[in-house]
Amino acid sequence: MFGRGTWAIFGLGQESLETFRTNLEDRALMLGESQLAADAHTRHSCVDTIGINPFSGPRLDEEHPVGPDHEPELAAYAKAEPGERPAIVLSPEILDCQGYGATEAHFRLHPSMPWYGLWAVSNEWKDVSDVSSIREQRSYRLMERPYKFLPATDKKTIDQDTAGITAAVRKQIPVLLDFNDGRLYIENSGKQLLYQITVRLRLLGLDIFPVAWTYPGRPHWPSDILNRLYENTPYQREFQKRAEDAARFRPGEIEKLEDRQLESIVANFFSMTELPNGFWAGLSGPAQIRMHHASPPIAVKPPTSATTLLNMTSDAKVLSGALTVQEIVSATSRKGGEYTFRKDLFCIAVNDRMNITEIGAAMLRGFGLSSFRKDILREIRYTKQVPSIDQFWSNWLHEMSNAVRTLEATFRDVLDIDGDQEAGILPMKLPNQNAQAEQQAEQPEALGV
C-alpha cells in the first residue's frame, strides 16, 4: 500500500453500514473472524484460512497472543461454523484478549466520513523447505548416488520417506471500505483470494456485489480510449523527432529541448493530450502496438519505440498502455516570479484486463498516486507534525476515490458518451436478473398492475 499496485473494486451496499457497525462491536463475532483465531486454526488444523486485523495493527495478533494452553480452544472456535459459535463458551483469557479488533474505533478511518480500513490476512499451510535438496540428501546417504540416477523403484522409496517442513505462510492485503461512494477496494488481483476475502467480509454484515467497467456499445473501449488520446495529441512532430534521434544516437548523445516541460513530455511519453476537465493524459510504456488489423501485438517499453511503430503503417493502433494523468500547477519562486509545472496525479494501466468478470471486480492495474508520498512529506516539513495512521489511510482512500471518479469522467469524455447514458463502474447484470425482469414484464399482475 501507498505505492504502485493493483486494486480490485467491488460494489458496497450503503444500507449495510449499520449492520457492519453493530457487528464490529460484537466481541464474539469479531474474534471468530480475526487473524488471531485464523492463525490458530491454520497451525492446529493444517488448513488455509483468512483472518482480519485492524488497519493500525497489521500483526496485532502477534503483539497480544493467547497463551499456548488456550490455542486449541481458540482453534476449535475458529473451526466451528458461524451459526455454531454462539453456543460455545469461551475462556475470558480468549474473549478479552487484546490481539484482535473488536470495536468500530479499531476500523474507522475518519471521524465524519463512513470510511473503514482493515487487513485481510491470508494464512497458507504449505511446505516451506526445499524438498529437492532433502531428496538429494537422502539419496546420497541411502543410495550413494544423485537422485536423478536412481531407478524408478528407488526414487519412489526416497519420495515416500521425504518430508518437508510445513508452516503457515502469511500474506497481508489492505482493504478499504467507502460507504459514501458504495465501493470496496482490495489490493490484490488473485481471483481465488479476492473471492475468499469477500466471503469473509460478508460474514461481518457487508453487502458486496459485482461491478465492472461498463461502456455500452463499445466492446473494445480500452483501445478506443488509447487511440483517441493518441490521435489528439498536439506534440506529434516532437514525438517523431525524439524517436528519430533515439534511432540515430545513444541516450546520452540526444540533445535535450530548451523547454523543460516539453523535454519531460517527449522523454517519458509517446502521447500527451489535454482533457476537457483541464487535466492532461500521457501515454507511456509498457504498451502493446498492433501494426495491422490481423497482426499480433508487439510489446514495447521505451516511448520512442511506440512512436516508431505507430508511424510505420496507417493501420497501426495502440492496444494497451500506461496512462498518467497530470495537472498544470502555477507556483511562485523564491524570487517572486511565477512559473508553471506539470504534476503527475495518478497512473493506471489501460488494457483489456480491467475487469475480472468471474468474480465481479473492476480493476485498477498498475495504479499509483504519483505525488502522494511527496505531498505528505512536504506537509510534514511545513507543519512539523506527522499524520496519524488513520490519516495516512483515509488520505489514500480519499485520493484513490477521486482518481477513480476522474477516470470515469475522462473515459466518458474521450468516448463521447452522452451524459444521460450510464457508463463507468456499474453493477454487473447477472443472467438470472435479466430472466426475472422479463418474467415480471410478462406477468404485470404479479406487480399489482
Image (cartoon, rainbow, N blue to C red):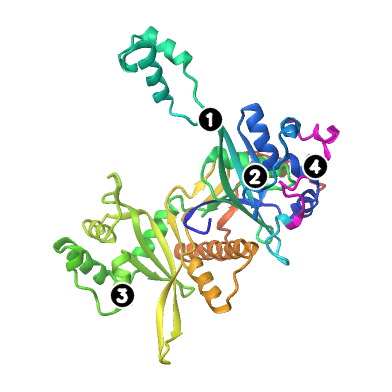
Of tags 3 and 4, which is closer to the observer?
A: 4
Q: In this image, 152 relative to 359: left or right?
A: left
N-terminal label among 2 and 4: 2
Does the segment drawn in magenta span residue 82?
yes
Residue labelled with disc 3:
262
Farthest residue, direction bottom: 336
Mark nearest the camera among 3 and 1 is: 1
Could you say whether the residue bearing mark 3 is in a helix, strand or loop? helix
For the point 65% across and 37% down, the residue is 39
Which structural element holds mark 1? Answer: strand
The amino acid marked with disc number 3 is Leu
Earlier sequence position, callout 3 versus callout 4: 4
Which residue carries the number 4 mark?
A: 95
Q: Which residues are magenta?
A: 80-105
Helix, strand or loop under label 4 = helix
- Relative to residue 402, is residue 379 depicted above or below? below
Q: Earlier in the sequence, mark 1 or mark 2?
A: 2
The numbered dot on residue 62 is 2
